[in-house]
Amino acid sequence: MIDTRKLKELVRLMVENELTELDLRDKDETVTIKRGGEGPIVQHTAAPTLNGSAPAAAPSAPPPASGDDDPDLVAIESPMVGTYYSAPNPDADAYVSVGSNVSNGSVVCVVEAMKVFNEIKSEASGTIERILVQNGDAIEFGQKLFLVRPS
């Protein structure tokens, strides 16, 4: 598994040098980082072992918690790796809570990546049914943050 410090350093170098894509490979790992409008996208794969299977690694997103399988709910996922914060600063109220109404494009949280705070916006209109992470949690690309019941 790639070291988070190394990953953050790679993203910082990409930003400083205005790179949009970085692809690194060695005998054990392949790391691809792509930057776009929302933030970096990271793909990481390990090289196969001698028996042909990849070494065991932690999943990139946690397994669904009970109740996540409601087909009527829409997930708001993290577009990047970073640290989840429910409010713009420690003294402010959370952007949303269970029962809050959100509209397409409304800010639901911030994710800190490389000391940059990125606003995460809802891609659905509806009511927040579940918050799947806690303030200060380290989150992964594609990890479900909220479940929304569309209106």
Image (tube, rainbow, N blue to C red):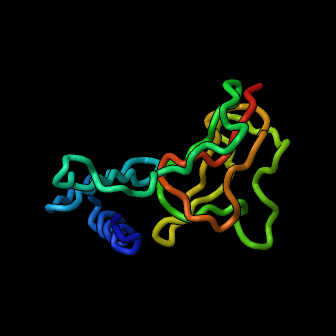
Measured along the vertical axis of the image, is residue 43 above or below residue 149? Answer: below
Where's the C terminus, which quadrant? top right
Q: Nearer the viewer, residue 67 or 42?
A: 67
| Residue 53 percent location from the top left of the image | 25, 47
Residue sitting at 51 percent across and 67 percent down?
116
Measured along the vertical axis of the image, is residue 66 above or below residue 43? Answer: above
How many numbered tags mark residues here? 0
Q: Nearer the viewer, residue 128 or 130?
A: 130
Q: Residue furthest front?
A: 51
Q: Residue furthest right?
A: 99
Instruction: Locate residue 50: give its quadrant.
Output: bottom left
Measured along the vertical axis of the image, is residue 100 above or below residue 56? Answer: above
Q: Nearer the viewer, residue 148 or 108?
A: 148
The answer to whether residue 20 is visible is: no
Residue sitting at 56 percent across and 64 percent down?
138
From the viewer's perspective, is 142 left or right of 100?
Answer: left
Residue sitting at 35 percent across and 64 percent down?
1
| Residue 145 percent location from the top left of the image | 63, 48
Instruction: Locate residue 22: give its quadrant.
Output: bottom left
The answer to whether residue 144 is visible is: yes
Residue sitting at 40 percent across and 54 percent down?
40
Instruction: Locate residue 9: give its quadrant.
Output: bottom left
| Residue 63 percent location from the top left of the image | 57, 46
Q: Nearer the viewer, residue 60 or 113?
A: 60
Measured along the vertical axis of the image, is residue 96 above or below residue 73? Answer: below
From the viewer's perspective, is 86 left or right of 19?
Answer: right
| Residue 60 percent location from the top left of the image | 45, 52
